[in-house]
């Protein structure tokens, strides 16, 4: 069976030579599911693996727009609709200069299995652009979003493909895109999630990925009889996921000591409390400034050009829990070695694929619990699914209801993941369990629907 998988990967690499992130994501899943393929020969017969690694369609388009000074700008837009076996395509839009086809495909591929784990009927997709909203004024962002949507609208719909936000796409960007979509099709539909709560959005959606991550970590720690309270938590990133992971961790009694952006890391060993976190939100969400501004008001170490994992390695900082919430491949083998040395007990991914394969291997071999993003950060898309339900019912649930549903979904994902790992001889292996559970659900649906 391993030779069979190696053959599929060899073909995939030849077809997608420049797409390193996509290749990495596929390899990580396929080697985990070998026991499933051995137990279910029908998945081999119907070539489920060969089909699931090929997206249903890839859409690439030009995005011309005029900036506030009257200059014409041109960006590239993407939407990869990967698999809709269990529901309409669902996945965020990322606006970042690093965006390319390989990154979009890796994100869309991961989304298939993440969405399957939520227990909600959602397929996998992803999209975005190499446009950088950082430092842009509202007029520039609006003009770009409107141009982007004048092409994307043809390919989405409330029962077809429902985008959401991701890195670089928050409430401002969702609002501009949805407004343009509504104007073009002349309908008020639930085609986007992450909308403002005043016009169809769900409470807790902004907080969901970060909150869900901490709920998942809490369940992980329970398996070893450990409370979250008083644990020292290192968080990378300073955006939406990092902010609300910090908020929930603080609420549950943990001590958060770090946040970072692409410019620097701040380490506050006294702990980032609610007041300090509020200032970070002001810096990042309102002033749209750099995290180093934190040291203008509070005593902390600022490390230019380093992320928190560099800091743990170089400064020998002791932590209990690591929550990578920035971007892909931010934790390498050296970082993993430093985390083990620091006494880290749990690494759970708030970002998508932030831990490199050799780092994952080292963490697991040294007894560090590892929660992969497709399970640990599924809270965001889970509440997106709840937002879709509310839109279809023409209802809006209160914060307490949505938060309770989110908490229950994250507990269910944790349970499903561990159960699958146990069933296939990998007890306690969250990576294998998440891949096996997500793949098994989608594969069974694909077999049922025939060769399409």
Image (spheres, helix red, strand yellow):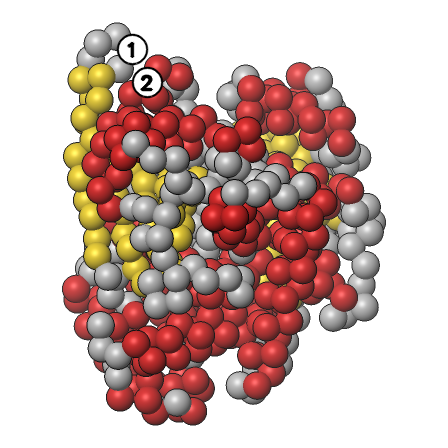
Return the residue found at the far top.
69
Q: Residue at x 76, y 70 (%)?
A: 224
Q: State whether residue 58 is above or below residue 450.
A: above
User: Residue 269: percent from the left, percent from the top?
Assistant: 75, 37
Near mark 1 (Cα within 10 A), the count class, few <14, some 14-19 or many ≥20, is: some
Residue 91 place in picture, x, y as percent: 40, 50
Q: Quadrant of residue 271?
A: top right
SS label for mark 2 = helix
Which residue bears the numbered disc 2?
Answer: 140
Residue 291 percent across, percent down from the top left:
57, 27
Q: Give residue 24's mark.
A: none
Which residue is drawn at the image coordinates 47% and 76% (left, top)?
A: 436
Say which residue appears at 46% left-offset and 45% top-offset: 327
**Secondary element at tag 1:** loop
Is residue 168 visible in the rendered structure shown here?
no
- Figure label count: 2
* Residue named by callout 1: 68
Q: Circles 1 and 2: CB distance less than 8 Å?
A: yes
* Crowdedness near tag 2: few (<14), some (14–19) or many (≥20) residues, C-alpha within 10 Å: some
Q: Residue at x 40, y 72 (%)?
A: 442
Using residue 73 as the reference point, say whether residue 138 is left or right of it.
Answer: right
**For residue 136, which quarter of the picture?**
top left
| Quadrant of the snapshot with the C terminus | bottom left
Query: Front-most of 299 and 386?
Result: 386
């Amino acid at each position: 069976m391993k030779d069979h998988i190696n053959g599929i990967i060899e073909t995939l690499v030849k077809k997608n030579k420049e797409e390193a992130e996509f290749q990495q994501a596929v390899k990580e899943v396929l080697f985990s599911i070998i026991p499933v393929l051995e137990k279910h020969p029908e998945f081999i017969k119907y070539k489920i693996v060969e089909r699931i690694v090929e997206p249903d369609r890839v859409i690439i388009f030009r995005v011309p727009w005029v900036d506030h000074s009257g200059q014409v700008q041109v960006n590239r837009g993407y939407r990869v609709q990967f698999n809709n076996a269990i529901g309409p395509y669902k996945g965020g839009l990322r606006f970042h200069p690093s965006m390319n086809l390989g990154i979009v495909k890796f994100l869309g591929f991961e989304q298939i299995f993440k969405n399957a784990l939520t227990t909600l009927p959602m397929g996998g997709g992803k999209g975005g652009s190499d446009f950088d909203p950082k430092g842009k004024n509202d007029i520039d962002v609006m003009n770009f979003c409107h141009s982007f949507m004048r092409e994307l609208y043809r390919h989405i719909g409330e029962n077809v493909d429902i985008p959401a936000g991701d890195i670089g796409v928050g409430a401002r960007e969702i609002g501009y895109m949805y407004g343009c979509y509504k104007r073009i099709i002349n309908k008020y539909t639930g085609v986007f999630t992450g909308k403002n709560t005043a016009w169809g959005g769900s409470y807790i959606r902004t907080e969901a990925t970060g909150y869900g991550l901490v709920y998942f970590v809490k369940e992980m720690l329970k398996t070893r009889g450990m409370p979250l309270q008083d644990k020292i938590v290192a968080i990378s990133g300073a955006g939406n996921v990092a902010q609300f992971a910090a908020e929930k961790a603080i609420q549950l009694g943990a001590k958060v000591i770090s946040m970072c952006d692409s410019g620097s890391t701040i380490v506050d060993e006294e702990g980032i409390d609610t007041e300090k976190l509020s200032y970070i939100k002001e810096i990042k969400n309102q002033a749209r400034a750099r995290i180093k501004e934190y040291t203008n008001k509070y005593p902390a170490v600022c490390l230019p050009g380093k992320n928190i994992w560099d800091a743990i390695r170089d400064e020998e900082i002791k932590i209990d829990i690591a929550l990578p919430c920035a971007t892909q491949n931010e934790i390498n083998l050296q970082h993993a070695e430093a985390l083990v040395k620091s006494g880290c007990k749990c690494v759970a991914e708030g970002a998508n694929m932030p831990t490199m394969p050799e780092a994952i291997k080292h963490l697991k071999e040294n007894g560090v619990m590892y929660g992969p993003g497709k399970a640990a950060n599924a809270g965001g898309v889970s509440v997106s699914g709840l937002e879709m339900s509310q839109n279809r019912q023409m209802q809006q649930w209160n914060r307490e209801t949505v938060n309770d549903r989110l908490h229950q979904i994250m507990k269910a994902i944790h349970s499903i993941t561990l159960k699958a790992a146990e069933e296939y001889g990998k007890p306690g292996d969250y990576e294998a369990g998440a891949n096996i559970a997500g793949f098994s659900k989608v594969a069974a649906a694909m077999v049922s629907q025939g060769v399409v």
